[in-house]
Amino acid sequence: MLETLIVFVVVACCFGYAAWTLLPPIARRELAKRLLRLPLPGPLRSKLEMAARDSAGCHCSGCDRAVVQPESQPLLFHPRKR
């Protein structure tokens, strides 16, 4: 009986991780906002708060972690040698 319970918990955790990873960012954000209404422990709550924030850019899940450059860099074009 204990082995069945352990296997059930492991499979449920794997299912939850796979479902969270494969969800589109908009659905993940809405689910995180709804889960934040529940009383959750600190580390899980902080992860959900990060997921519930709107992204800063194009919803590609990478813009919100980008480092903002304070100054622009000039583009240098080098002529091709013939």
Image (cartoon, grey):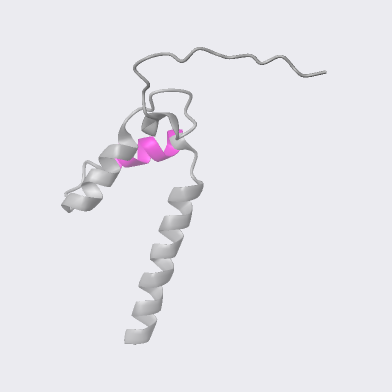
Question: Which quadrant: the C terminus?
Answer: top right
> Which residue is depicted at the point 45% across and 35% down?
61
The part of the image, by quadrant, that contains residue 46 is top left
Question: Which quadrant: the N terminus?
Answer: bottom left
> Would you say residue 64 is visible in this rendering?
yes
> Would you say residue 40 is visible in this rendering?
no
> Which residue is depicted at the point 41% across and 40% down?
28
Q: Position of residue 55 (x, y in %)?
A: 38, 28
Front in this rendered view, residue 22 or 69: 69
Q: Position of residue 22 (x, y in %)?
A: 51, 48
> Which residue is depicted at the point 45% across and 61% down?
15
Front in this rendered view, residue 79 or 26: 79
- Relative placement, left or right, of 4 versus 75 is left
Front in this rendered view, residue 64 or 81: 81
Q: Is residue 4 above or below residue 15?
A: below
Q: Is 56 colored magenta in this rendering?
A: no
Q: Is 30 colored magenta in this rendering?
A: yes
Magenta segment range?
26-35
The part of the image, by quadrant, that contains residue 62 is top left
**Image mark count:** 0
